[in-house]
Amino acid sequence: MAIEITAFNWVPDFARGYVRDLRPRWACEEIGLPYTTRLISPVPPKPADYLCEQPWGQVPVLHDGGVQLFESGAILLHLAERDERLLPRDPQARATVLAWLFAAFNSVEPWLFELGNVEIFSKDEPWAKLRKPSLVKDTGKRLDGLMEALGDREWLGDGFSVADVAMVTVLRNADHEDLMSSRPRLADYVARGTARPAFRRALAAQLADFRPEPVAA
């Protein structure tokens, strides 16, 4: 059975190309794994049966034969187990990739997620204006640590891996600040990732699935 990835059929323009179903799409494209998409509406209320699969009504959800799971990080790990091009078999190389996979979602993404909230969703709130300067500074420190750890290497591990799928998609969310332009090694890292043919195919596929207007459930 083909892998099925649940994705939204519409999002606002600023979110197009950034919804997290891009992550499993990219992983599948990297290893030539066929997949289909099940498109759902982002407009509430979400169908009760979907909330049984994803408690918050978010995407992606993955169906892989008899296996069903949610959360993009868990899905990436599930897919990576299929192919050593995404997850090496050597114990130390595997451990390094797994550490960076979790770091992308736990040590980097929360800061960028909060920054997006401050700059987009809550930008008119007084608290957001007060929070932004220190948040940008603290986020920069996180990115500095990542940049130093990356050093002059092309990828986080010995070669491209699922950790880079995670980290590149996380770092793309920093493009609305000068956080990346002031850190050229990280900007080059993201450029290498987004230049990969598999990423371009995944991005094109996500964009092609969006409708012009919101579609009800």
Image (cartoon, rainbow, N blue to C red):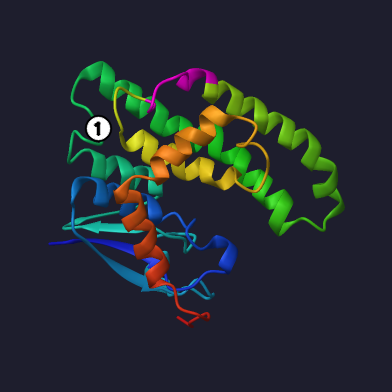
Horizontal arrangement in the rendering, residue 64 relative to residue 120 (left or right): left
The disc labelled 1 sits on which kind of residue? Leu
Q: Quadrant of residue 76?
A: top left
User: Can you say whether 140 is above or below 170 in the image?
Assistant: above
Residue 13: x, y in percent? 57, 68
Q: Residue at x 46, y 33 (%)?
A: 189
Nearer-the-camera pick, 119 or 114: 119
Nearer-the-camera pick, 154 or 82: 154
Disc 1 on helix, strand or loop? loop
User: Can you say whether 42 is above or below 214 in the image?
Assistant: above
Query: Per the image, is 151 magenta?
Result: yes
Q: Residue at x 47, y 59 (%)?
A: 17
Q: What residue is shown with label 1?
A: 87
Q: Does residue 53 appear in this view?
A: no
Horizontal arrangement in the rendering, residue 37 relative to residue 181 (left or right): left
Residue 132: x, y in percent? 78, 42
Horizontal arrangement in the rendering, residue 47 relative to residue 145 (left or right): left
Residue 159: x, y in percent? 29, 27
Tell me if mark 1 has few (under 14), some (14-19) or many (20+) residues whose alpha carbon lies within 10 angstroms of its own. many
Segment tinted magenta in the rendering = 148-156
